[in-house]
Amino acid sequence: MGKKNQIVYPRHMFWNRFYRPIAFLLARSRHYKRKTFFRMKKGESYVVLSNHQGGLDGILLPYSFSRHLYGVLTDSFMSIGFAAKLFKYQFGIIGKKKGAVDLKANMDMLRCIKEGGSLLIFPEGNRSYAEFQFDMTDGLGKFLRFFNKPIVLFNFHGGMGSEPRFARKRRKGPFYGEVKRVLEPEEYKDWSDEKLTEVIKENLKVYDSDSGDLYKSNRRAEYLERMFFVCPKCGKVETLYSRGNYIYCKECGLKVEYTEDLHFKSDDPEFKFKRLVDWYNYQIRFVKNYEVGDGVIFKRGKAKLYVSHSGEKRKLIAKGPVELTAKTIKFAGKTIDISEIEIASPINGTNFNFSTTNEDYLVKGDARFNPLKYVLMFNKLDTKMRNNKADIYYNLVERN
C-alpha cells in the first residue's frame, strides 16, 4: 500500500521494461525512427516537453528515453473505463482537463517530481491541426521553475506528413524524433519566466512543410473536410468533399490538390492558399465575420453523444444528425443550451468534447464529420466559453 495521492510506484518501472519491446515493434510498424536516445542520470528527475504531431506520440516518445516517463494526458483518454484505469495503474498516467486549469493535475505533477519521477508533457495540449504551434500558457516558464529540474525539449518530425490529424491512412515519408535541446537549471535560473517560455516555444516549433521532404500517397487529401468546412471561392459551408489527392467544392466546382510536399496546388486563379494554415486562418476570419441569425448554422453529418467523466465508462445518450443554432446544439433526442458551454475542443479527426455547467460530453462523429467548425463557432456565439475567454486553443485568433 502506498501513501495517499502517491504517484511513483516501483511497479511502473517493471511495466516500463515490459513496454519497450512493444514500443519497438510499434515504431517499426509506423516507420518511426528515434534519432537520439537520451540516457537519464541515475537519481535525477527530468521534465520532457515535446511538440505533438500524432495520435501515438505519447507511446513513441518514451522509446527514446532510458527510464520511465510519467505522461500527462487529456482526461478524455481517462474516460474509457477499465483500460484507462489499467494504464494508470501500470504507468502512472496523470489525467488533466483539456483546455482548462487543473489544480489537481498540477499538484500530481509536482508530487511526481518530488517522489523522483520524470514527467512527459505536451505543452501545446493539442495535436497539430494545420501545422501551426498552439498557444502555450503564459505561466509555463513560471510553473517549470517549481520543478527546478533539467528540461528536455523533444521534436517529432514528419508526423504531419505521414499521419496528419485529418487522415485515416498513413503516407510514406520521413518520420522521426530527436532531443532538440536540454536546459539545465543552472542555464535558465537567471532567465525571466517570459524568456524561458519563448525558448521552449522556439525549440518545439516544427513545420514539416518547410522541410522539403515528400510524403507519397494516392489519398493525400482524403478527409480534409474534417478540417475545412468553408469553400474559399464561393464562401459556402459544408460543401467540401475529398477524394484521393484532391478536395472539391460541390457548389462552385473548386478543385485543389494536396501535394507531396504538403502544399496546395490549384489551376483556379481565385485559390491563393499555399499551406494548411492559410486555409485555417481563412476559416477563422469567416467565423469572426459570420452574421448570426435565427436559422440553422450547421446541419450535416451524424454523431453519437456520450456523457464522459474521467475514470468512468462513457454513457451513450443520443445518436443521429447534429444541428447547431445560435441558441442550441441538438442531437437526436437531446437538446443542449449552448450558453452553458464552458469549454470545448476537437479530439482526434472526427470527435470533440465539451463541458457545460453541470455535465461533460463527448461527441463522436462519422467518417467525414468536422468537429472543428462547432468549436470555432462556440467561440463566436453567446457561450460561457467565449464570454470567459476560456479557449486558448481554438479561439478566433489567426496563426502563423
Image (tube, grey):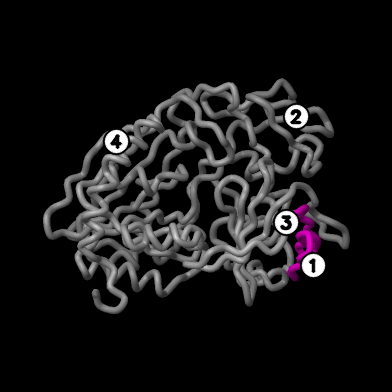
Element class at badge 3: strand
Q: Nearer the viewer, mark 4 or mark 2?
A: 4
Three-letter residue code for mark 1:
Lys
- Cα distance between the residues tagged 4 and 2: 42 Å
Q: Which residue lies furthest to the right in this view?
A: 294
Element class at badge 1: loop
- Earlier sequence position, callout 4 versus callout 3: 4
- Cα distance between the residues tagged 1 and 3: 20 Å
Which of these two is toward me, 339 or 24? Answer: 24
In the rendered structure, which segment of residues is drawn in magenta?
320-337
Which of these two is toward me, 379 or 86? Answer: 86
Three-letter residue code for mark 2:
Glu
Q: Nearer the viewer, mark 4 or mark 3?
A: 3
Q: Quadrant of residue 123?
A: bottom left
- Earlier sequence position, callout 4 versus callout 1: 4
Residue under circle 3? 319
Three-letter residue code for mark 4:
Arg
- Earlier sequence position, callout 2 versus callout 3: 2
